[in-house]
Amino acid sequence: MPLWTSVTLTYDSLFDGVGVELKILSQGADPRSIDLLSQFIENTSERRTRMDAVAGSATLDAFWGALRGKEDSFVEFFRALDRVNQILMRRAERRGQHRSSRAQVAKGSVPSRSG
């Protein structure tokens, strides 16, 4: 009966080993390569994902805790914010149309209203 050992290597274990070497290598390596490797480590680290999820959960819990008892005020605030955003969007659309027509007049492609 053969003996065998199963070894699990996670990215985080690998990254821990690479981290020390990365500091040494970064002194003479192409900065773009170091940056790409750092981004890869950041995006694939299971440990970092877990930490981000815990921090995110704590932030959401604090937000919902602060909201308790003030739900009606927040609902009205977000409704008012929505109305303000709609007004600003309509104004931006009118300005964009106005600028577009002014540019066409300046180019001579649309006759001016004054002449």
Image: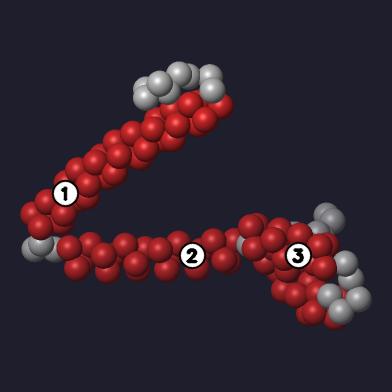
Q: Position of residue 80 (x, y in %)?
A: 16, 49
Quarter of the figure with the C terminus: top left
- The residue positioned 37% from the left and 63% from the top of the image is 57
Three-letter code for the amino acid on which mark 2 is drawn: Asp
Q: Residues within 10 Å of mark 3 (few under 14, many from 20)?
A: few
Look at mark 1 in the image and give the residue it sits on: 80
Q: Residue 101 is drawn in which quadrant?
A: top left
| Viewer-side label of 3, 2 | 3
- The residue positioned 37% from the left and 37% from the top of the image is 95
Quarter of the figure with the N terminus: bottom right
Q: Residue 8 is drawn in which quadrant?
A: bottom right
Q: Which one is earlier in the sequence, the residue at label 3 or at label 2? A: 3
Residue 25: tell me if it is visible.
Answer: yes
State the residue in front, 21 or 111.
111
The kind of secondary structure element at disc 1 is: helix
Q: Position of residue 23 (x, y in %)?
A: 80, 79
Cβ atoms at labels 1 and 2 below 8 Å apart: no
Three-letter code for the amino acid on which mark 1 is drawn: Ala
Give the distance between the C-alpha atoms of the residues marked 1 and 3, in whole angstroms. Answer: 43 Å
Look at mark 2 in the image and give the residue it sits on: 52
Q: Residue 39 is drawn in which quadrant?
A: bottom right
Q: Residues within 10 Å of mark 1 (few under 14, many from 20)?
A: few
Look at mark 3 in the image and give the residue it sits on: 35
Q: Which one is earlier in the sequence, the residue at label 1 or at label 2? A: 2
The kind of secondary structure element at disc 2 is: helix
- The residue positioned 64% from the left and 57% from the top of the image is 43
- The residue positioned 57% from the left and 66% from the top of the image is 48
Q: From what the image shows, is residue 34 above or below residue 114?
A: below
